[in-house]
Image (cartoon, grey):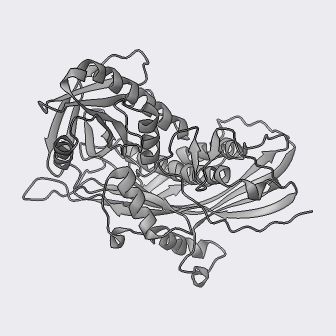
Amino acid sequence: MGRTYFVEDSVEQYLQNILDTSGKACVTGLLIGQCSPQRDFVLLAVRTSPKETQSDEVDEEWVVEHATQVSRMLPGGLAVLGVFLRAAPELSIQAQNILRRLVFAVEKSITKARLWKLANDEVHDRVALNICSETKKVLCRSFDVKDPKSSAKPADWKYQTGLSASWPVLECNVEVDLQVPVPADFANRELDKCIENGLKEWVRLIQQCSCILNGKVMDLDKDLLDGTKKKASSQQFVQQPFVVQLLRPSKFKTDDRSTALVQKSSGTVVLKGVVHCKAYIHTNKPKVKDAIQALKRDVLNTVAIRSQMLFEDFYLDPEGYTEKGARTEEYPLPKRVFVPLAGTGVMICDYMFKDEAPKDIQFRIKELLDLDVKEDQLDMLLEIDSAIKLAPKTSHPQSMFPDDYNPMQLKVEMLIHISLPAAFQMEPCGRAVMGVKQFLYIPTVLMSILCIFD
């Protein structure tokens, strides 16, 4: 029996608009939602914006890059579940092959950027939706991305009103203070890989954290919504917020083996600050352990994404990093900005560097998610408020937080030499492209630098 996808009814109208306005051209896009063992949920469809150089062929790299950027904008519990393709009926056979390639390519790219992996018992099916431009018939299939030889399986596509309006939201503030040694023999342009490797131990600690939800320790196998009231008129749950505290375990448990390693170091990377994390979970008898897992993965994602974005900018502007010498540098990482997703009960996010304005966030949301948002819908203070709440636990009194305070910092103390990778090429306008492809979105960063040279 195939999987069933329950879909927000706003997605139906969005896809209909694409059918009405796209003429005969092929249109590709992403499907965003959440998987569960019994059923899957699709909350949003996002068209991949056309390239400046139009072509009748589907550009796989362009779609994959779009999916990679969109995945950064999703809170815990939400993911890119698959792709859709709107094509003419004479392309029906080719469309299935195109969709299969896109599904596997998108999943591979997103998985590569994560610090965590799906467990074997989790859902590995991804959806491929083929829409005929003339008959408007929708053909839904799924592929098991864990199996490279997987063939298409039939799936049901059902629209539903208010699908996510009452989804519970889990929130927590996490104070990050990591020190990553940089090996003396690290190669040029590998500082980002060094940080990624250094985060592996921290990932293990986050995954082992115990959690308190709304001040209570809950059985992991218990239904998260036990005892939650429903709306009398619709029999839907009222959206339940959960404030979560992560309790860090001992670094080494008694059943773990540890090995001392002596390694020559050329410096240290310090990742320090406060992150605000969110996760959403469906209302179809969700388990406590599934909700906690979604929140922990959001913690891991948001820290990894910020460091990735900063090093992308390093490669775009390498001139300030080519001198060799002892130096200490501090870089403000982007803060997280949340915005409600219209017609649903969830929020999406973006990352805002210190030199950016709200209009930059609005532009990216429009470019990547095809959504129009107003400036007053942007919540840019959540992480600053989170840092202030944790201030009594640190050496920073609340009065030390200015309006433009950035809650996350990356500090580098090392012998540093970064040069431009061959894969990046500078254009006259100062922007970079991957090979000859356009880059949908690479943010700029204003660096607050303190350099000490010998």
Which of the 4 quarters of the picture holds residue 60? Answer: top left
Give the x, y percent position of residue 315.
66, 49
Q: Nearer the viewer, residue 145 or 453?
A: 453
Which residue is the extreme one toward the bottom? 399
24 over 403 or under it: above or below = above
Total tally of numbered discs in the picture = 0
User: Residue at the right extreme?
Assistant: 454
Residue drawn at the location 66% of the way across and 39% of the way down: 254
Q: Position of residue 398 (x, y in %)?
A: 57, 81
Residues 441 and 275: in front is 441
Percent coordinates x, y for residue 327 in the rendering: 83, 61
Q: Residue at x 27, y 20 (%)?
A: 153
397 up-or-down from 135: above or below: below
* Residue at left offset 15%, top offset 53%: 236
Quarter of the image that includes the C terminus? bottom right
Q: Residue furthest left?
A: 233
Q: Is residue 159 above or below residue 280?
A: above
Residue in view at x 59 percent, y 42 percent: 204
Q: 21 and 235: which one is in front?
A: 21
Residue 137 appears in the rendering: yes
Q: What is the quadrant of the N terminus in the image?
A: top left
152 relative position to 328: left or right: left
Q: Please indicate whether residue 303 sits to the left or right of residue 146 in the image.
A: right
Is residue 121 something one can see in this rendering?
no
